[in-house]
Amino acid sequence: MKWTSALAIYVLFWAFSVFLVLPFGVRSHHETGDPLVPGQADGAPANFDPRRIVIRTTVVATVLFAIYYANYVYGWFGAEALTLFGRVPASG
């Protein structure tokens, strides 16, 4: 695999991991006891920390990409392991 392909796949893993990590650890103003700012939505986060989100996302994406790349190198799970309605996919 070329390094540019690996980088592109890692970026995809990172972008997907943002949506996995984003909801964890976020608390609303009602949960923290902070007063609401006029015009603020009731569910708006009170403790949003982008740095923490980026770090968590990077860790999750790196672990997922490492598993993906190890599978790519060692071939633990391939297309031949997937069957659709009992049929084996055609190999190229």
Image (tube, grey):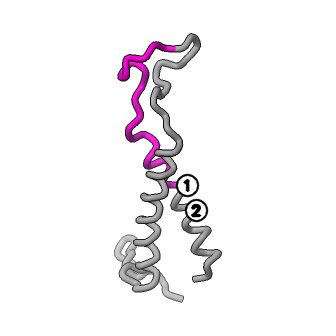
Indicate the position of residue 7 as horizontal and vertical percent values: 60, 70
Quarter of the figure that contains the C terminus: bottom right
Q: Residue furthest right?
A: 4
Q: Is residue 31 above or below residue 64?
A: above
Asked whether, in this view, residue 73 is left or right of residue 38, the answer is: left
Disc ID at residue 11: 2
- Judged left or right of residue 43, residue 31 is left
Badge 1 density bin: few <14, some 14–19, many ≥20, Cα 10 Å: some
The residue located at (36%, 82%) in the rendering is: 76
Residue 42: percent from left, percent from top: 47, 18
29 magenta-colored: yes
Residue appearing at x 49%, y 57% in the figure:
58
Residue shown at the point (56%, 61%) measured from the top left:
12
Give how far apart the Cα atoms at labels 1 and 2 are.
6 Å
The region drawn magenta spans 16-36
Rendered image: mark on residue 15: 1
Quadrant of the rendered image containing residue 37: top right
Residue 32 placed where, x, y %?
A: 37, 22
Does the magenta-highlighted stretch encompass residue 70?
no
What is the quadrant of the N terminus in the image?
A: bottom right
> Which is more toward the observer, 27 or 5?
27
Residue placed farthest to the top in the image? Answer: 38
How dense is the environment of label 2, judged by Cα within 10 Å: few (below 14), some, or many (20 and up)? Answer: some
Give the SS element for disc 1: helix
Q: Element at badge 2?
A: helix
